[in-house]
Every structure is written in C-alpha cells, then in structure tokens.
Image (tube, grey):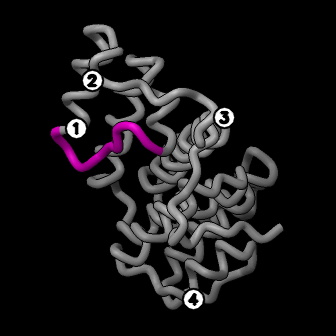
Amino acid sequence: MSRIPVLQRDDMDAEQQRIHDAISATTTGRVGRGPAIGFAYSPGLWECHNATSAHQANCSLTPQQVRIVSLMTVRHWNAAYPLGAQARSALNAGLAPAVIEAIRAGEQPEFSDSADEMVHAVVGELLKTGTLGDALFEAASSTLGYRRLADVVGVIAHFSGTAMMANVAGAEPPADAASKITT
C-alpha cells in the first residue's frame, strides 16, 4: 500500500489530467503506480520528469549504459520499486544478467565493453563523492567525451528523483520484481 493516495483521473485538476493523458498515451511513463503516484501531485514536475525519460531513449549513451546508470542510482537510494523496473528494462536493453545482479547486490560487475566499465566507474564516484577526481575526469573525458559525461550526470539526476519519489510515495514493487536490495 502506498503512503501517498493514488490520484484517480477524475480527482485530478485540469493540468494534472492533461499530463496524465499525455503520459498515458506514451510508453515513457507509468500512471497510478511507482513514483508516478507522487509525481501526479506536482503536474509540472511530472511533465518534466517524463520529458527527461523520453530524452534518455535517444541520448548519447547506449541503452545498456543508461540502464547501468539507472540501476546504480536507484540501488544507491535503496529504491525497491524502480530497481525492479530498471532490472527488467536492463534485460530488455541487452545488459547481461550477471551485470544486473552484481549492481543489484552492490558488487563490481565484469564488463566486456570499456565504455560501459567507464560509465560504471563514473557513476560510482559521482554517487559516492558528488564529483569526479581529476584522474577519473580525464579518463572519462577521453573514453566517453563530454556529451556522454553530461548525459551520465543527467541520468543520475533523473533516477535520483525517481528513486526518492518512489521511496517517499511508498511505491511497492510487484511480488515478482527482481528488487531485493542487499545492504
């Protein structure tokens, strides 16, 4: 049971209904479950949040790299609902199950792609310290370039909001979700 009541469309104001309908017409957002339970109460934020979701589908990162970032971020915030959702999305994006499980367990995955490994290193340091040390910044700039580095930061920001909203709303993952968080 969520901590925040799920708004039904009929209980929303005109702005909330407009955004609800726009999100319902796409595959970039969920209505009535997960973090959307909380986002529905702030329609402007809900709309912006879903716009960043849409951006990530076509950003400079590969779909696998977006999922590495998303999994690490929701894992960092101990957010069970988005962890399950992102694990499913990561599998669909072609991320190796062993990588997904290692991230879920808070362990170091083995990567076959050096750019994926760099994304993982960057996200780990950003979530731990809030910045990148000079050596990692230079390596990341060389391996990923500035555009992908900027997109990594944006995906972290997006999924930090997703995770915190899910946690505040009390979004519960489905019983079959791969979302157990190991501390």
Decide: few, some or many residues near mark 4? Use Cα within 10 Å; few <14, some 14-19, many ≥20.
few
Instruction: Where is residue 39? Give x, y as percent.
Output: 47, 28
| Res 61 label | none
The amino acid type of the residue labelled 1 equals Ser
Decide: few, some or many residues near mark 1? Use Cα within 10 Å; few <14, some 14-19, many ≥20.
few
Between circles 4 and 1, the one closer to the viewer is: 1
Of 110 and 106, nearer the camera is 106
The residue located at (63%, 62%) in the rendering is 72
The amino acid type of the residue labelled 4 equals Ala
Decide: few, some or many residues near mark 2? Use Cα within 10 Å; few <14, some 14-19, many ≥20.
some
Q: Earlier in the sequence, mark 4 or mark 2?
A: 2
Find the distance from the CA under tag 2 to the CA under tag 1: 8 Å
Find the distance from the CA under tag 3 to the CA under tag 4: 30 Å
Q: Quadrant of residue 14?
A: top left
Between circles 3 and 4, the one closer to the viewer is: 3
User: Is 137 drawn above or below residue 40 in the view shown?
Assistant: below
Q: Are marks 2 and 3 in contact (CB under 8 Å)?
A: no
Which residues are the magenta region?
A: 25-33
Q: Earlier in the sequence, mark 2 or mark 1?
A: 2
Q: Earlier in the sequence, mark 4 or mark 1?
A: 1
- Mark 1 lies on residue: 24
